Image: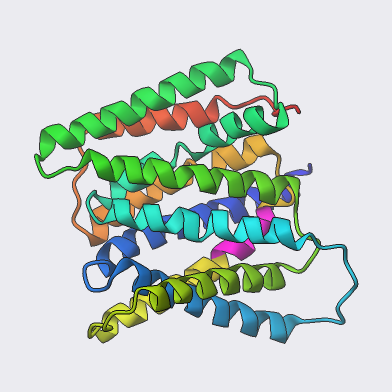
Amino acid sequence: MSVKIYTKTVTYLALAQSLIAFNIVSAKYSLQYISTNDYLTMRYLFAFIISLICYLCAAKTPKKENVSYSILFLQAITGGILFNIPMTKGLSVIDASVAGIITSLLPIFTILLSCLFFQTKLTRTNLVAIGLSFLGLLLISLSQWHASQDHHISGDLWVLLAIIPEAVYYILSQRFPAPISIFLNGTIIFGINALLFIFLFLFHPHPIPSIPQPVIFLISTQGFALSLYYVFWLKGCRQAHTTLVSISAAFMPIMTTVLAYLFLNEQINCIQIAGIVIIIMTIVMQKEKIRS
């Protein structure tokens, strides 16, 4: 990989992780005014409309490609509804900065699942990194519990649960990339999730509360950020090795912490900083290319 391609790939991945951080922080604020399902339905509808417009504007003569729609559906639900429902449940009871830090364990979960299902070789460095990552997570959880009796361990567990399907999505998107345009890929994924959330709404009908206009604007902005995330993620992911994708995850907890401090007035203590450093160290330790 040339320096130019490497720089462009890292930039794409860093931007994608920064957009995740933005959505985590803004979701924490939005969920004060709207239920989880209503929020996710609106966000995915906005993302679907934006991606569809982009696809129609950029569409060329379609080529006949051998697309595995079952794999595409699995990518949609693992990176969408199965990730977002537990994530938003966790965000309802813990700080956005803590959720972002816990989510930075994603590369470790990706390695573990790759070993489990694809016989990916697990090195001694990987084992040390896994142990250190859980030490960092433990420090973060204990610091929050000590700082506030209102901190809920259940929120940490919900976010940890969200990481599993997201790790599956990472593996599927890298090993089975869909041979279609990025905008069409995003349109299909957002459309599937929007339909699933609408179905959940119809299955549990309830009055829609009055939502402040600034919150509606914020959710639409999140939909735009989500559509941009898939563009940057897929562009970077299609050119990067697993190791580089893992290292890029270090941008997300840092950006989440900064944004939560700036916009949600969340505080961070020395123990949390130590936890962040340990988790980022585990990501940087993944120097070897993962061999199948």
| Nearer-the-camera pick, 53 or 79 | 79
Task: Name the side, left or right, on which 38 lies relative to 268.
Answer: right
Residue 68: horizontal and vertical position, in percent? 78, 59
| Residue at image point 61% right, 67% down | 189
Residue 241: horizontal and vertical position, in percent? 71, 39
The residue most toward the right is 64
Is any atom of residue 221 visible in this view?
no
Instruction: Identify the image quadrant of residue 58.
Output: bottom right
Is any atom of residue 176 visible in this view?
yes
User: Looking at the figure, which quarter contains the N terminus?
Assistant: top right
Report the magenta stretch's main SS.
helix
**Rendered image coloring scheme:** rainbow
Task: Name the side, left or right, on which 227 lies relative to 38.
Answer: right
Range of magenta residues? 229-236
| Residue at image point 26% right, 42% down | 154
User: Looking at the figure, which quarter contains the C terminus?
Assistant: top right
Task: Name the side, left or right, on which 123 lies relative to 127.
Answer: right
The residue most toward the left is 149
Residue 199: horizontal and vertical position, in percent? 47, 74
Residue 217: horizontal and vertical position, in percent? 35, 81
Residue 247 belongs to magenta span: no
| Residue at image point 33% right, 81% down | 216
The residue most toward the front is 203
Q: Is residue 286 above or below residue 72?
A: above
Task: Name the side, left or right, on which 46 lies relative to 265.
Answer: right
